[in-house]
Every structure is written in C-alpha cells, then in structure tokens.
Image: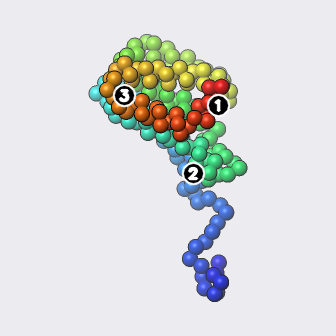
Amino acid sequence: MTSGNGSPSLSVESDQPSWLRAKLADFLTLSRVVIGLVILALSFVGSDAYMAVVILLIIGGITDVFDGRAARRYLGEKREGALGKHDLEIDIFFVLCALAYFSFSEIVIPKLMGLGWIGVALIAIAAYKGKPKILLIFEIPAILALIISAGLYDLGVFLSIVVPALFAGTVINHKRIRYQLF
C-alpha cells in the first residue's frame, strides 16, 4: 500500500485477524485442560496445595469467561474456534479435575463420593455429547460442591479470595449464567 504522496504506508490494515488473535479463544479454552491436569497432579500433594489450587481455579474461571468473548470478537460470524464446539466438555473436565483434587486430598469431600460423581459425570459426557443442557446437570452441582468445599475447608481464604472472584465472575458473565441456568 502507498500513502497519498506515493511513499509506502507504514500501517497495513487487514480484514483478516492475525494468527494469534484468531487462535486466542482456542488457547484460552485449551489452557483449562492444562490447568485441570495441573490441579489433578496437585492431588498427590494433598491439602498443602490448596492455595495453589484456589489460584488455578480462579485463573481457569477467567479463561472460561474470556474465551467466548475472544472468539466473538476476533472470529466474527464464525464465532467459534476449533475447540469452541468442545467448550462445555472442556469446562466439565476442568471442574471434574478440581473435584478430584478435593476428593483425593480428602478436603471435605470423601474419596468415594467424589469418585462416584466423577464416574457418573464422565458417563454423561460420553452419552450426551452435544446436549449442553444435560451436561450442565452435572457441571452445576459439581461447581456448587467445589464452592461449598472451599468454604468449609478454609473460611478465611473463601471469604477473602473465592467470594470476591465469584462475585466478579458473576457480574462480568451474568448473561451466560442466566442463559445456562434458565
């Protein structure tokens, strides 16, 4: 491109998003898989890793809030990256990894109860792939169990970190929450 005086223009506008912007939503979605696996690995550390797990859960929640927004902003009408169609399954995987941490670490949730819920949820994921409302039946109670477990385990951390993060996430993502619940 040239500027009005015939010299080359320094800014080149493109209708196509850059490669990084086009993949940002997928990176954010995939990061929840990685964070979930790290949380699962921290199960072997036990309750000593509790603070790290809380921080990782908040980071994972942030990526969940912004992956859809990034897809809509940078992908336009397509509105979904390569992993977008698996977002709900990845969200459930992330939540189940956190539930496994609380179960294996025996932080409030007994192992057998946590493993039972994880088993039922994995069967539901396999059986009802592509039916989001049915998958939410398993995701929402698991999230509530995590919130309650965090509160019962360490009330100070819960009130100072978890509650403000939940409040901020709810305010930022209220439309999605309302859609999923109703």
Q: Which mark is residue 179?
A: 1
Q: Quick one: 70 or 118, which is closer to the camera?
A: 70
Residue 104 in sight: no
Q: Earlier in the sequence, mark 3 or mark 2?
A: 2
Q: Is residue 96 left or right of residue 155?
A: right
Q: Quadrant of the C terminus?
A: top right
The residue positioned farthest toward the bottom in the image shown: 5
Query: Which residue appears at 52% of the width and 29% of the height?
Result: 93
Q: Earlier in the sequence, mark 1 or mark 3?
A: 3
Q: Secondary structure at mark 3?
A: helix
* Image quadrant assignment for residue 20: bottom right
Q: In this picture, is 101 found above or below 165?
A: above
Nearer the observer: mark 3 or 2; the answer is 3
Q: Is residue 134 left or right of residue 110?
A: right
Q: Quick one: 58 or 119, which is closer to the camera?
A: 58
Q: In this picture, is 2 found above or below 146?
A: below
Q: Quick one: 64 or 169, which is closer to the camera?
A: 169
Q: Which residue is mark 3?
A: 159
| Amino acid type, residue under disc 3 in the picture | Leu
Local crowd size for mark 3, using a 10 Å CA cut-off: few (<14), some (14–19), many (≥20): few
Residue 124 in sight: yes
Query: Which residue appears at 61% of the width and 35% of the height?
Result: 175
Q: Quadrant of the N terminus?
A: bottom right
Q: Which residue is mark 2?
A: 23
